[in-house]
Amino acid sequence: MSQSRTALSWLSDAVLYQIYPQSFADSNGDGIGDLAGIVERLDYLAWLGVDTVWLNPCFASEFGDGGYDVVDYLSIAPRYGTNEDAAKLIDAASSRGIRVMFDLVPGHTSHRHPWFQESANTPGDHRYIWSDRIASPMREWIPNQGARGGFYRANFFPIQPALNFGYARSDETEPWRQPVDADGPMANRAALRDVMAFWFDRGVSGFRVDMAFSLVKDDPGQVETGNLWRQMREWIDRSYPHCALLAEWGDPRSSIPAGFHSDFFLHFDGDALRSLWDNNTGSIGPWSDGQPCYFDPDGKGSMETFLTAWNEAEAAADGGGLVALPTANHDFSRLTCGPRTRDMVAPAFAFQLTWPSLPVIYYGDEIGMRYLPGLPDKEGSQLDTQARQGSRTPMQWDDGPNAGFSTAPADRLYLPIDPDPDRPTVASAQATETSLLRQVRTLIHLRKQTPSLGADAPVRVLHRDYPFVYTRGDSHLVVINGCQEPARAPLSDADGARPLAVHGVEITGGEVRTQGFSYGIFELPAS
């Protein structure tokens, strides 16, 4: 694993930027973002300093779940353009030093995918999971409308039949369970390799893998799922050694040893990410625990939960992969959410961009776009109690019509623009030296220029409360205060520290003093 890590030095140095393609930039005025729109905005991303973009699914889809219901893995959805447009995006990004990663949905397809249409009408086809009777009272068993009859197992929505990667355990009362090496599961493994190879050959630098932990069913500890991904990683290392796999697993302790180059701390699996950002407003789901987070005005949070999870993940990864730390994502509330305004979130970026993780910035977070409550469901965005649409609103580029996102009439936009007259835009933020965007850009460039602030340098925590204080590589000091009240901490051997990016932090008299919502990054004097 360590040799593979060395071969992917670009990933350990990367700053990722997640794009929800239907909401980023609309080039043709139909109200929906597209690949050509992303090309038009690549200069902005290069100016910001990100070097890798990850696009949510852009394959052909019926869009009952925002593109996570794939009809054809080998074709770009017409709303976004064509395969030729994808090639143009990859080339244009590469010319600016930016890699492109796609989102891969291996666990299910749309019920309109040709594989499912064939399977639904062909007894004995086992590309999907079939039962002749209602297998259980669980809602994932759906009556089949095809000629073979019976019921199929679905993931999430009924329109998403689960691909059959087998069961880790057999059960005499459930004869539909197939072992992982049966013909149907093996055909799906081969198809998964074919899909990845198709896009790797066209210049895609890797995939973020949706629900990567869930492929093999009834798999205690995800042992068989881990074996599957280790085999995929061995193939990638042989055939495409400079391409990366990022897991939506939510448990780097398991996923990195299973072969992934990186895995995310996520809101729904464990409380590490929630302990940082989740202020119990915005998108609320069954994972919500009501606990305070560290980056919150009231200052009732703690870094203990995050640090415990971080230390466990680092020990399990053993240098073989990276923990990805996102500001938000298409399923979870933005940093600017509820009582946390855009004037309060710069310390969160300072932490994310100086911690030894893989930082992932969700589009618009860098200007302080807010989670927008009260929006209607759009293409499956309302998942049970989770109102995910509030984090999927169009990018705010300027003060023109539709905030520069699209020339379409407002009622044709994918989702409404934030109606707040004080909404942030890229144009206004670029023109303001003290804006959040300008601070984020400075932090990104500082990380890239300073190896000690990157993913590979050691970290040592000096103070765990408010302020949070740590060193990177024994040569740099970082101070973070994520609440509104001033805070101080004892600090020895820091006299003469050279400020690199400082907002409201002072080192004096053997202690560090911080204003509310402040941060400081310093170069320590040579010992």
Image (spheres, helix red, strand yellow):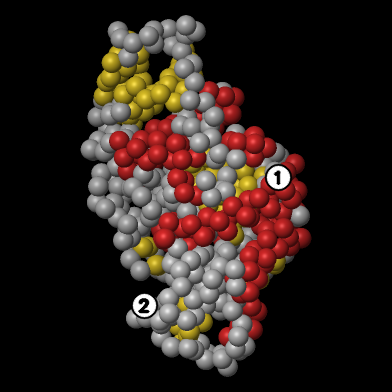
Quarter in which the N terminus is drawn = top right
Graded by Cα atoms within 10 Å as few (under 14), some (14 to 19) or many (20 or more), the crowding at tag 1 reads some
Q: Amino acid at mark 1?
A: Pro
Q: Residue at x 47, y 30 (%)?
A: 354
- SS for tag 1? loop
In this view, which residue lies farthest toward the front? Answer: 172
| Numbered tag placed on residue 241 in the rendering | 1
Would you say residue 132 is visible in this rendering? Answer: yes
| Numbered tag placed on residue 138 in the rendering | 2
Q: Position of residue 351 (x, y in %)?
A: 42, 32
- Answer left or right for 64 relative to 134: right
Vertical position of residue 459 compared to residue 208: above or below: above
- Answer left or right for 483 relative to 263: left
Q: Quadrant of residue 218?
A: bottom left
Vertical position of residue 189 compared to residue 461: above or below: below
Q: Amino acid at mark 2?
A: Met
Q: Residue at x 42, y 60 (%)?
A: 220
- Answer left or right for 467 relative to 164: left
Vertical position of residue 378 compared to residue 133: above or below: above
Q: Earlier in the sequence, mark 2 or mark 1?
A: 2
Vertical position of residue 88 compared to residue 450: above or below: below
Q: How far apart are labels 2 and 1 at the CA level?
A: 41 Å
Q: Residue at x 76, y 60 (%)?
A: 84
Q: Position of residue 255 (x, y in %)?
A: 50, 49
Graded by Cα atoms within 10 Å as few (under 14), some (14 to 19) or many (20 or more), the crowding at tag 2 reads few
Please name whichever residue, 330 or 188, is drawn nearer the observer in this view of the structure: 188
Q: Position of residue 407 (x, y in %)?
A: 60, 60
